[in-house]
Amino acid sequence: MTMAMMKTILAAALAAAVAGCALPTTTVKAGASRPALSVQGAPAGAVLYVDGMSMGEAGTYDGVKQKLLIEEGAHRVEVRQGQAVLLTQQIFAGSGETTTVTVSAEAAK
């Protein structure tokens, strides 16, 4: 047997050994879905604040067309129109559930 043949056989055996090795497999599982917030009764132009940060127009998050995804835990929710505070509420957002806050008709006037 020549040296070239031995190298070819050795390379083929090595390739077969490597091909026989199984690569590790990983599985990614999504956890529970994030909680969401919706706002009912907010007048046009009212702004939603969550934990002091502006989230945009409160009416956008009506729960039908769109909900605001938030982190699980306690949050301070406010709806303001200009300088007037229409709603202030402490909520606890649980995993996968939607919390709805409602601006009263009296506050919206």
Image (cartoon, rainbow, N blue to C red):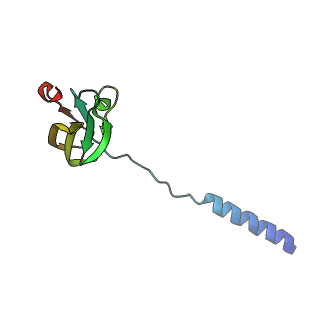
Horizontally, is 46 left or right of 89 in the view? right
76 or 92, nearer to the observer? 76
Residue 40 appears left or right of 4:
left
Residues 85 and 69: in front is: 85
Q: Residue at x 64, y 58 (%)?
A: 19
Q: Is residue 97 above or below residue 5?
A: above
Q: Position of residue 17 (x, y in %)?
A: 65, 63
When the figure is inspected, residue 74 is found, relative to residue 17, above or below; the finding is: above
> Which residue is at a point 62% across and 58% down the rendered structure image?
20
> From the image, which quarter does the N terminus lie in?
bottom right
Residue 37 appears in which quarter of the rendering? Answer: top left
To which quarter of the image does residue 101 belong? top left
One can see residue 76 in this view: yes
In the image, 39: left or right of 25?
A: left
- Residue 40 in which image quadrant: top left
Quadrant placement of the C terminus:
top left
**Taking the image as drawn, is residue 70 in sight?**
no
Counting from the top left corner in percent of width and height, residue 21 is at: 59, 60
Q: Residue furthest front?
A: 83
